[in-house]
Amino acid sequence: MNSKTSKKDIIKSVTMTVIGTFLYALTVRLFLEPSGLVTGGTTGIALALQRTQHIPMSASILVLDGLLLLWSYFDLGKKFAAATILSTFTYPMSLEIINRFLGNRILTNDIFLCTIFSGVGIGFSLGMVIHAGASTGGMDIPPLSLKKHFGLPLSLTMYFFDFAVIIAQALFTPIENVLYGVVMILLYTVVLDRFLLMGQSRTQVTIISEHAEEIRQRILLDLDHGVTVLYGEGGYLKNPQNVLITIVQNRALPSVEAAIKEIDPVSFIAVSRVNTVEGRGFSLVKKYR
């Protein structure tokens, strides 16, 4: 049973990684490359080499990512290299296939549209690869190596390498393109974060009421949501109070609020967004006793 599950997980991971890297390559070819935008990582280095030395991006990325893959294998271990190897080769291969299929065709030269679609496309495609459990490798490897040997903060060194690549491109790129490139990087960072949390966010409802037991029964039996009861006391009068906490699907919030208000119109309700929830009823199948 476990072997079947693991095979399904592997197939799913490989499929998502291949699709993600293909979409990344498509975004680079359709919007990033023709617009003159700058970016970081090995893609930024390959863009610079193509614009100045006329070296095809697919060839530069294959060489650069291949060398970095070898670095990761000897320095960061086989496990990290195994998670990186698929995207290392599918990305330049996808670029080459797309280039041969599209030729010189360009969707738009509008730099604003290219910035928006580059940011959304890169964030979405990288999110797919990371969600699949794979690694994009590339310029992530030097910061990881520096952290391993010298304890340098990972986020700081990653930003340093990315901005070093961008500054190098800025020397021969119009300042407007550089500024749009920075906006694009900020946009794909936001899209990537949102994608990784997509489908996992829930709503937490905290309830304080004199009718806590009746509300607990309604949420459990009628609405079929779990409830946690905390025993506390009021901060002013020091009266004992039961605090109810329930986490529900976002769309279930109105029905929960309506049920609470029906029982106790003056109850205290605090609603907050929870990014990730795991456990029974969410990441695991609900059990009834």
Image (cartoon, grey):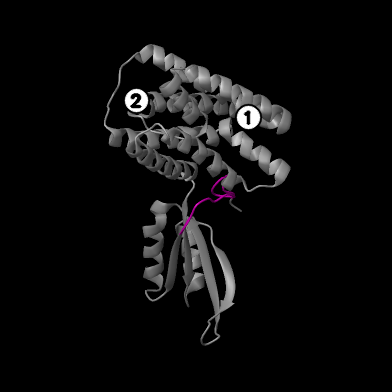
Crowd tier of the residue under label 2, counting other residues whose Cα lies within 10 Å: few below 14, some 14–19, many 20 or above = some
Task: Check residue 83 in the rendering and tell me which mark sits there, or answer none.
Answer: 1
Residue at point 44% right, 52% down?
A: 249
**Magenta stretch bounds:** 273-287
Residue 168: x %, y % from top left: 47, 34
Foreground disc of the pair 2, 1:
2
In the image shown, does 193 or 215 lie closer to the viewer? 193
Is residue 69 toward the left or the right of residue 123 in the image?
Answer: right
Task: Check residue 34 in the rendering and tell me which mark sits there, or answer none.
Answer: 2
In the rendered structure, which disc, 2 or 1, sits on the residue that comes first in sequence?
Answer: 2
* Total count of labels: 2
Residue 252: x %, y % from top left: 40, 54
Q: Amino acid at mark 2?
A: Pro
Residue 90's place in the image compared with 117, above or below, is: above
Q: Amino acid at mark 1?
A: Ala
Q: Does the magenta run of residues contain 275?
A: yes
Residue at point 55% right, 85% down?
A: 238
Q: Quadrant of the N terminus?
A: top right
Q: Does the magenta run of residues contain 251?
A: no
Residue 58: x %, y % from top left: 49, 18
Residue 202's place in the image compared with 128, above or below, is: below
- Alpha-carbon distance for marks 2 and 1? 31 Å
Residue at point 53% right, 27% down?
A: 17
